[in-house]
Image: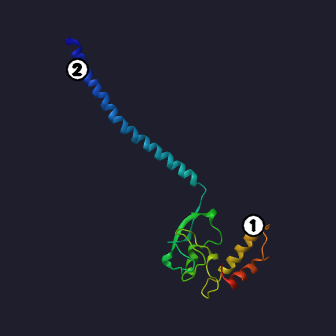
Amino acid sequence: MTAPASTSREALPLLGGILFGVAAGLPLSGLVGGFVMYLLVKDAETEARQGWELVPVVVASKALAAGDLVTHETMAQRLIPAQLVTESVVKPDSAHFLVDQTLTAPFAAGEPLRWGYFEVGSSSFNASAPQVLTDECKRAQASRPDVSRRERTAEEIRARLLKKGPR
């Protein structure tokens, strides 16, 4: 009977070694797996952004309501993909034209400001903004020729907007 007791004593260190190996190996394999996943996600992110040039635009720094005056504090700059920027989006080099201008539509925080959403009748408004609005109207008409409309030219739309104000 003494032989089984000696074999159980020899098995005890072996069992302890196995338990220690498992206890040390699991966290280590978790760290290695987490690092590999991090690298894979970063690689996928780089691949997804490839070919997207980011350009700065002026955005609302906080939620703005129709009728609010725009100030330096209510504007911010943000990078968005160039494919999403049209002529109607305000660029940072033109932001000073928006100071003390009245919004005609609400904007959510972070939403790009657009020239068409400001009262164009005020005397201090950017002189190029009506032309931007006219160009935007022409593009909209060209993109949807099948839609019936009261006005037939961008100038007629602009005249209506300036005369009656926004709806």
Which residue is tagged 1?
143
x 39%, y 42%: residue: 31
Counting residues from the N terminus, which is met first, the one under dot 1 or under dot 2? 2
Residue 8 in picture, x, y percent from top left: 24, 19
Tell me: 17 left or right of 33: left
> Distance between the Cα atoms at labels 1 and 2?
86 Å
Q: Amino acid at mark 2?
A: Arg
In terms of image quadrants, where is residue 112?
A: bottom right
Residue kind at label 1, given as amino acid type: Ser
Q: Name the residue: 57% across, 81% down.
A: 102
Secondary structure beneath label 1: helix
Note whether 57 is above or below 67 in the view shown.
above
| Picture residue at 64% right of the left edge, 83% below the top | 120
Q: Quadrant of residue 153?
A: bottom right
Position of the C terminus by quadrant: bottom right
Most distant residue in the top direction: 1
Q: How many marks?
A: 2
Q: Nearer the viewer, residue 29 or 103?
A: 103
Q: Is residue 14 left or right of residue 117?
A: left
In the image, residue 124 sits, relative to residue 110, either above or below, namely below
In the rendering, which numbered label is found on residue 9?
A: 2
39, above or below 129, in the image: above
Q: Which residue is at the far bottom? A: 123
Visible residue check, residue 131:
yes
